[in-house]
Image (tube, rainbow, N blue to C red):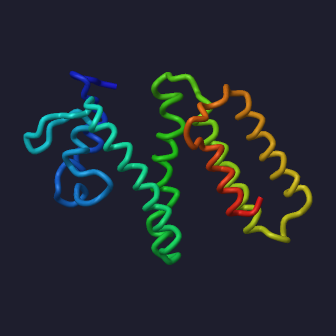
Amino acid sequence: MAENNGINEKLVKKYQPYLTREDKGKGGIFTTVMRGNLLGVPVKGRKIRDKDYDFRYDVRNQLKNALVDLELFLETANEKDVNEVFTAQALEPIVRTLLLIPTFGMEKKPDRKRADIAKLFIHAGLRYLEFMQGERAGELYKRGIEDAYRLSIYLTELFEPSDKQYNTPVELLGRFKFRLGY
């Protein structure tokens, strides 16, 4: 990745259309100035605050609230709106960036927190597929689902435990299990 004074040129090029108010830059979680700060690029002549603790704190809080907003949308929107926004094509880059790029793209060691998130996706996905198949699923299929659940738990448990000072994805999975009834 080409970096120049902390600026990742590849990311700047990727997100350049979102640094202006026209078309793609309008709306979203971040303002165009915040996007520029995250990328280390001044927008509208503003000072870059990418390493400023207050800025990072604001970004984290904004993202936490955005996740609540996404959940609210999913719980209140009609099926057509949900299917228009949440597609495999739209979610693939997010899931890839969350789970694969930190490990394979940046040479970071895989960690328990991301393993817990991967397990959450696996369990929710398997539960969805199991629910959608219902009675049509044969005994071999059901055993395969149970084996996949156990394998994901086993592989996650190979990691060191996460810090328990805040809600981890495993704790969130417990809440998710309660909602789905498994």
Q: Nearer the viewer, residue 98 or 46?
A: 46
- Residue 46 image point, x, y percent: 11, 40
Q: Is residue 137 left or right of residue 33?
A: right
Please provide percent x and percent y for residue 61: 37, 47
Left or right: 17 with respect to 70? left
Residue 45: x %, y % from top left = 7, 40
Query: Looking at the picture, does residue 179 appear above or below residue 5?
Result: below
Of residues 122 and 29, the one nearer the viewer is 29
Q: Viewed as shown, does residue 139 lie left or right of 172?
A: right
Q: Residue drawn at (78%, 35%), measured in percent from left and top?
A: 154
Quadrant of the snapshot with the N terminus: top left
Name the image quarter holding the C terminus: bottom right
Which residue is pictured at 39% across the width and 49% down the height?
A: 63
- Vertical comparison of 113 with 79: above or below: above
Give me the residue at 49% from left, 31% from top. Answer: 102
Residue 104 horizontal/vertical position (percent):
52, 28
Q: Is residue 117 above or below residue 174?
A: above
